[in-house]
Image (spheres, rainbow, N blue to C red):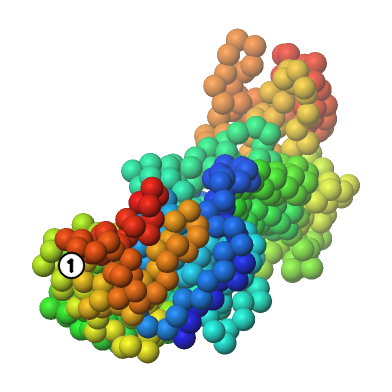
Amino acid sequence: MALSFEQVSFHYRSVWFRRPGDWVFRDFSWRLPTGKTVLLGPNGAGKTTLLALGVGAMRPTAGAIHPDGVRQESGLGPLRRAAAMMPQRIVAIPGFTAREQVAYAAWLRGADPGLAALAASSALERVGLEDHAASLVSTLSGGQLRRVGLAQALVLPSRVLLLDEPTAGLDPAQRSTFRALVAALPEEETVLVSTHQVDDLSEVYDTVVVLARGEIRFEGSPSDFLAAAPAGSARPAEAAYIQILGSEA
Amino acid sequence: MIPVRTALRVMPAAWLAVAIAAFSAWYATLIWSPPGYGTAATAAASGAMPFIASFVAGTAAWEGSRLRRGDVWGGPWVRPGWRIAGAAALWPVVAGLVAVAAATVTKQLTAAAGPPDGLIVVVMALDVVTYAAVGLAIGVLTPPALAIPLASCLALLWLAFVPAMYPVWLRHLTGMYRDCCGLGEAVAPAALVSSAAVDLALIAAAAVCCAVSTPRLARAGAALGILALGALIGTRFASGLTFAPVQPRDGSQLTCATERGVQVCLWPEHASASAQITEAIAGVRSRWLAAGIDAPTLITEGQGVPTPGTLRVRINSTSQDGVVLAMATAMLPPFPDCGHGTTGGLAFPYLRAWFAAAGGASDAALQSLQAPGDDLNPDVLTVVGQLEKAPPAVSRTWVEQAEATAVRCDEFQPDVRVRP
């Protein structure tokens, strides 16, 4: 199930006034394909904004965003039902255990309370956190907290899964575990992972996308991406990234 | 939806529900209301609202803070914001409603009153929802360390201090009905509408403030506009009332009986003691006539505009002395409205004491009416003693003169001496 962005324009607004800020996207059209896609780009490229728009956290200033087969006519409801997002910052809800927090997320996403409790247990098992289901989220480590975030995103079936910097702040072992979790997601799911980590792209992802200044600068398979690296590069993924972005990297 | 088990573990509203209910029930019993009158008992129970509202607002602010700290509020959820807010505020609201029910039921029972007044209960419930909404909004919008004390204090100040401010009708915007009602009074619908309008405006303003997708300035402006509109509507209804949110009770509820040429009309709350009261009233009137005091032939608990030939009494105690004192008070002329504060009303205690003594009040009851004398004003009981020894014609003349003196605004030294 792909996610389509059609002539999307977006700018943030001042929190006090309606005064618009700079454009993040202008007439941005793109189709997120089925499978696992990694989204690369420098800070300020619009990665987090793209994911937030994709999950219906914000309304585009112009244009439309919709999963295939679901036409967005009005409101953000259809998009929110179709997509799920793991934000960059996972926050513990004060006083809640991991199971309670994931079940609450399921309820927030529309599940009945009974179903939410069952789905939470299943999601925690899926991310390997079943042993910590009864632990307060505030007592979990950074890696465990990330897994709670992933469980929140996975707790209900969704057509599109958006993960924002899921491995930021994790040590190499935790990053490896997390990549394995993403790799284990079914191939027919549509997954978009925003990250600064360019290692092991070929092992996990079907598509690589490079975004800069609100525009797609590259979209292709990992092998096509690595092919952009100058011959003989010691770290081909990084070299390809720098080669594609040039001075914007 | 937050499961009950989770709520019981993490929510102060759940932990403290029993405590606030018990406190509210106890506090409601401290407020006097006429025995047996359901509306008055319910109104008295509303005296616990400052504590209930403060509790509800504080615990709702706690839950709002949880939504804020957990990055829940404003997230890309399928559930609409009002459902999320409703689920978070559910336990504070439930705890508040339990406290309202505890205060009301306890007061109704201790006052031996009938069923509670449904409209007052509905407005108290609306108050609970209102303070939950306001508390939740404060919790969502302000840092936790500030939110909880701010919400609690605002609710307490609004309900405890505004009723003490001038103009006196301001209190009716808050939903406090503890000054309602005597037996002859019913709660004024204008007071209920007034506080309900302010409540609805507060709920709407809280909702607008939490609409995070709208710029803050627009939210603040809209919220202020809504509050101003609510205050305007509330004022429109409240400004016609005095300090008490009351209107005369429906007179069709009176039951009348005739005894020794006197027609006595009583409220249903006095039905069980009607024979005793009627007998006492007839006896007082007989003694008054013998003492030279002209008394009406229709004596009613119904309130309203003074009518010649009708004595409107407020009987708070059905004992002999209670009836005599109620009739003595009812015999007094209307208190003069003197803007500059000088009035002949100083003659009122003498008149009242004489009516009571002539009506057969006990010595103990008369002693309770004693006012301290000075060089200009003799002791009340001294005057009463002189009148008791005087013939009826002297008493009649004294009453006429004292009543005329009592309603004058330029009377600095009322002359209440008995002249043979």
Identity of the residue drawn at 61% across and 26% down: B380
User: Residue B336: where, in percent of width, then height?
Assistant: 78, 29
Within the image, what quadrant is residue B361 found in? top right
Disc 1, SS: helix
Q: Is residue A101 left or right of residue B195?
A: left
**Relative to residue B129, is residue A85 drawn left or right?**
left
- Judged left or right of residue A6, residue B72 is left
The reply to whether residue A107 is in sight is no
Q: Is residue B8 above or below residue B33?
A: below
Residue at 32% x, 60% y: name it: A241
Report the number of discs.
Answer: 1
Under mark 1, the amino acid is Arg
Q: Which residue is mark 1?
A: A175
Answer few, some or many: residues within 10 Å of disc 1's Cα (few below 14, many 20 plus, some between 14 and 19): some
Q: Where does the image place residue B37, in percent across and percent down from the top left?
A: 60, 63
**Residue at the extreme top:** B375
Q: Position of residue A233 (x, y in %)?
A: 20, 61
Quick one: which residue is furthest to the front in this view? A231
Q: Quadrant of the C terminus of chain B?
A: top right
Is residue A24 visible from the viewing direction of this image?
A: yes
Give the camera-side residue of A155 and B17.
A155
Which residue is pictured at 58% across the width and 84% down the height? A70
Relative to residue B361, is residue A80 drawn left or right? left
Q: Nearer the viewer, residue A79 or A212?
A: A212
Q: Nearer the viewer, residue A169 or B300?
A: A169
**Which percent across, then down, holds residue A205?**
30, 77
Q: Say which of B132 and A122 sits in front.
A: A122
> The disc numbered 1 marks a residue on which chain?
A
Location of the N terminus of chain B (image quadrant) = bottom left
Q: Residue at x 57, y 64 (%)?
A: A28
